[in-house]
Image (spheres, helix red, strand yellow):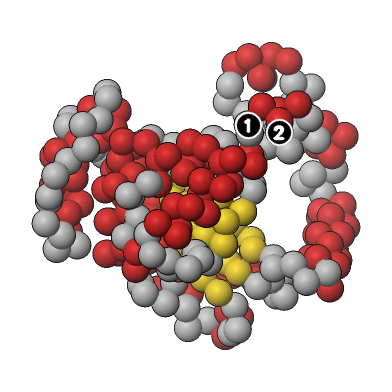
Amino acid sequence: CREPLVRAQSPNLRVFCIPELEAVYRQPAQRAVMQDWLGRLIACAQECGLTVCVSLDPTSPGRDEAIRAAGLTPSPDLYTDLTVAAARAILAQYPTIDVLEILTVENTDVWPAPKTLAQAWGQLASSVNLPVGKLPQAEHDQQAARALMGAAGDLQVSVRAIQELRTDPALAGKRLSAGIYCTNRWIWPLLGRYADALIPVDVEFTCLAGHSSVPVARHLTDALPPRLLRRTRIYAWCEFDGEMYLQQNEVSGLAQCLALARTAGVPSPVAIVAN
């Protein structure tokens, strides 16, 4: 973990995980036991009628460190290759999963961005032949520009990886998803249009647009074109964490997410889930 306050309080030495597991985390024999356990958990979930989705990120700060340590330079091509390799490793280890999802890093802003939201959206819109249209009046304009380009950069890598993976025999009978994890409410009308234009029509879209389901519904209102919403899985983001669950008022938030889908003229999106 990179947070200084967390590092100061954590008993972990190198790997931020359950402290008791750290000592055996990198030992192949112990790792095999954990992988076997997770495989059996997946089988149990499917026997109960659940759909199992495995999600991975196309980029990460830790991956950047490893790339530079190897004497390489991070790039979209390298990120795509690494994402494809990670996806194939997941499919080899857990071949019975139902959905493979590639989801952008939470609120990532590592990709180059111009100084204004208008410039950022102009670049993205022209890249997928969209009219610029009306821009939202975003608070903290430069921050919004960085958030927009960050989510778009990760999503581009995700879609390129999916295009390469979709003919892989290991994906036969499985669903593919490309998703965005961004809680900046001001840019979701732009992200919705961009995702609709960029993601192939036979690939599902997933979105995590806020922390707690009420902000999720608010951020996504009028943000997703109906064509995109029909293949969307909305993560309503509920922390099952004691009293925090009650404070998030998930019942009304989930109702608002469902109303959002109905208002858009869509019988039901692919799914609305509490994360």
Q: Position of residue 57 (x, y in %)?
A: 52, 51
Residue 270 location (% of width, % of height): 53, 66
* 167 is higher (above) or lower (below) than 179: below
At label 2, the amino acid type is Tyr
In the image, taking residue 255 as reference, residue 148 lies left or right, namely left
> Few, some or many C-alpha atoms within 10 Å of disc 2 (few <14, some 14-19, many ≥20)?
few
Residue at 57 percent of width and 36 percent of height: 212
* Residue 26 horizontal/vertical position (percent): 77, 46
Is 179 left or right of 27, judged from the image as shown?
left
Residue 119 seen:
yes
The quarter of the picture where the N terminus appears is top right
Residue in the picture at 26% in, 39% down: 112
| Residue at image coords 84%, 39% | 21
Q: Secondary structure at mark 1?
A: loop
Rendering coords of residue 251 (x, y %):
64, 42
Few, some or many residues within 10 Å of mark 1 (<14, 14–19, 20+): some
Please give the name of the residue rendered at 53% of the width and 81% of the height, measured from the top-left corner. Answer: 168
Where residue 248 is drawn, which disc sits there? Answer: 1
> Mark 1 is on which residue type?
Gln
The answer to whether residue 199 is left or right of residue 70 is: left
Q: Which residue is mark 2?
A: 245
The answer to whether the residue labelled 1 contacts the one labelled 2, judged by CB atoms less than 8 Å apart, is: yes
Does residue 173 appear to the left or right of 155 in the view shown?
right
Pick the front one: 96 or 60:
96
Label 2: which secondary element: helix
Question: Tag on residue 2?
Answer: none
- Residue 182 sits in quarter: top left
Towards the viewer: 25 or 43: 43
Cα–Cα span, label 1 and label 2: 5 Å
59 lies above or below 109? below
In this view, the residue in front, 224 or 21, is: 224
